Each structure stands twice: as C-alpha cells, then as structure tokens.
Image (cartoon, rainbow, N blue to C red):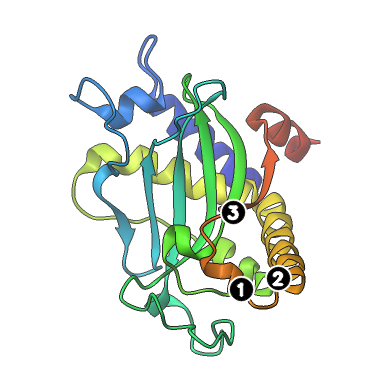
Amino acid sequence: MLNHAVQLLNAHAQMMHGDKNILHFMLRKRRKFIGYTHYPKGDRIDYQSGSQYYYHCHRENTDTDEHGHFHCFTRYKAIPKRIKPKALADWDKYIDSPMTHVIAISMNRYGQPIRLFTVNRWVTEETWYDAKHVNHFTKNFALEVEGDAHWQPLDRWLEAMVHVFAPQIEWLQHQRDHKIASLQKKHPRKNIYDDESVEELSSVSISLEKQIAWLAT
C-alpha cells in the first residue's frame, strides 16, 4: 500500500501544472465538462486485468462539494470462473454490459478525492458479485492501457487510489450488501437491485492526506 501511495503522489504531480488540477488534465483541450459524458472518451480499459474506469459529472445539487466522480469496474470476462456472480434469478440481466462495479470516487472542483461510494445494480447495469469477493477485485485492479500516453498518469493515479483505499472499499462493499438485504427484507415483493428509488448504498468521506499519513505510521 505504501508503494501505491508513492505511485499515487508521483502520478498526481505529473498531472499538476501551475494552478491546473486533475480535472483540467481530464479536459485536455476542451473548455468544459459536458454532463453524463465519459472522460476519457471510450473509457480506459485494461483488457488483461479487466480493470476499467471513466469520469463523469451529473449532479444537479450544487450545494454539495462534489464536481463529479470516477466509476471503477472489473470486467466480467477477467474474473476467474471460481468466483461466481450472486445467484439472482436474473443474474445475467446486464450480461451485454459485462462489468461489476468496484467503487466510485467523488472529486471536488479542486481535483481532490473527497468521498467513496457504492451504487445499486441498475445504476451501472452490472453483473453483481457479493462483497466477499471485493479483495480479489481490489488486489487485481491494474491499468496498463496501450494507446494515448497522455492518460497514463491518470491510469496510475486511479490504480493507486483503489489500492491505497482498499480497506474502505472492502467496508463499503459489505455495507452495500447489508443495505440491500435490509431493504429486501422490508420489501420482499420488490426487486431492490432494480429499484430506481435506491441509488447509492454506502458512502464514506475520505482524505488522501490522512490516508497516506496513516500508512506512513
């Protein structure tokens, strides 16, 4: 985790120029973000590890500190066959969008990570795995993406974020499963996984500075 913390800081420094931050880096030569558009275009996908991410912004509530968030995934075909999806009646409903969500990372307008959260299945149209498998997903989250070298510092930053905050991600995934189970028990006739009134399932505020200080002690 300390090695990943160093990787994170080095990658962060590569993306900073004067008063520019990670958000400016993602815009590249564009003037502004467009709501719901994925950045970088087409997502960043490591087909060997199955890791994938994109950034977007769509929050209508301007009272929050969040500008937008990264969604981080593991692709279904990269998951070992011994790790089975949750045995839902419609487990393959989103099989044409073959990913499972690892974590979302909220960013403020200064390009600082401020929160981690998980979402319901319908939000990301994902193949669902129990939280007991999250350690496999975080340990194997790697981004060696060929092509445009501009994005490689961001790849390294995202990869390191998932590893540096792996303890919080594990906790959030288990809280996610507890929330789903609790809601399903209260509403047995509903399919909570596809209930659009249930979007976020667990969340925690984070501080990169405090996390790295904790790792260094």
Element on which disc 3 rests: strand
Q: Quadrant of residue 203?
A: top right
Mark 2 or 3, which is nearer the eye?
A: 2
Q: Residue 74, position in %: x, y? A: 45, 66
Quarter of image, res 116: top right
Q: Residue furthest top?
A: 18
Asked if the residues shown at circle 1 and circle 2 are in contact, with their CB atoms under 8 angstroms apart, the answer is yes
Residue underneath mark 2: 187
Looking at the image, tell me whether mark 2 or mark 3 is earlier in sequence order: 3
User: Label 1 sits on what residue type?
Assistant: Lys
Drawn side of residue 90 relative to residue 163, left or right: left
The residue mark sitting in front, 1 or 3, is 1
The image shows residue 62 at horizontal and vertical percentages of 49, 22
Tell me residue 7's x, y (percent): 51, 40
Question: Between 29 and 154, which is closer to the camera in this rendering?
Answer: 29
Q: Earlier in the sequence, mark 1 or mark 3?
A: 3
The residue depicted at 40 percent of the width and 27 percent of the height is 22
Vertical arrangement, residue 121 with respect to residue 162, above or below: below
Q: Secondary structure at mark 1?
A: loop
Residue 21 position (above or below residue 195): above
Q: Which residue is mark 1?
A: 190
- Tell me, yes or no, if residue 3 can be seen here: no
Q: CA distance from mark 1 to mark 3?
A: 20 Å
State yes or no: discs 2 and 3 in contact (Cβ < 8 Å): no
Q: Nearer the viewer, residue 149 or 183?
A: 183
Q: Badge 2: how crowded within 10 Å, few (<14), some, or many (20+)?
A: few
Q: CA distance from mark 1 to mark 2?
A: 6 Å
Q: Which mark is residue 118?
A: 3
State the SS at label 2: loop
Say what amino acid the circle numbered 2 marks.
Answer: His
